[in-house]
Image: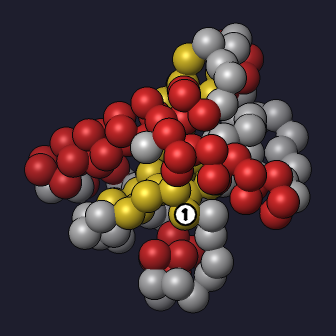
Amino acid sequence: MASIFTRIIQGEIPAFKIAEDENYFAFLDVFPLAEGHTLVIPKQEVDNIFDLDPEVYKGLFEFSQKIGIALKKAVPCVKVGISVVGLEVPHAHVHLIPINKVGDMNFSREKSKAADEELKLVQERIIGAL
């Protein structure tokens, strides 16, 4: 059965897409820890990030770097934090989160669904910064 991320890539589930190429896909987390919280995934469905082919692994972080640079320009923050947790969805993914303090990366915090209107606005700002 395809992961929710594979279904997003295939267009079965709508997403606020930031960027895509032949191997990678970036989109906004609808349950963000901070405004602009972006997920970057390989199109290849692999559960554990360390099981990715080395070239796909390196490419995932190169793609993430491009998105992170645009994210920093689009969302006021001190830095863009990066995290790989891997427990939420059985599909390797990188979290890019605008942060101002260490606690902003606390995944145990309660998350709420962001409004589509807010996601659309931040999506446009990030895409404009690419």
Asked where in the image residue 75 lies, by quadrant, the reply is top right
Q: Which residue is mark 1?
A: 17
Which structural element holds mark 1? strand
Q: Relative to the observer, which residue lies in front, 95 or 90? A: 95
Q: Is residue 39 above or below residue 78?
A: below
For this rendering, which residue is in front, 124 or 103?
124
Q: Residue furthest front?
A: 128
- Left or right of 104, for residue 48: left
Number of numbered discs visible in the structure rendering:
1
Q: Given the image, on which type of amino acid does mark 1 rest?
A: Lys
Rendered view: 127 above or below 37:
below
Position of the C terminus by quadrant: top left
At 26% from the left and 40% from the top, the residue drawn is 62
With 81 as the anchor, is 64 left or right in this view?
left
Residue drawn at the location 52% of the way across and 50% of the way down: 127
Quarter of the view holding residue 104: top right
In the rendered structure, the answer to whether residue 100 lies left or right of residue 72 reads right
Q: Residues within 10 Å of mark 1 (few under 14, many from 20)?
A: some
Foreground pick, 28 / 54: 28
Residue 55 in percent (x, y) is at 12, 50
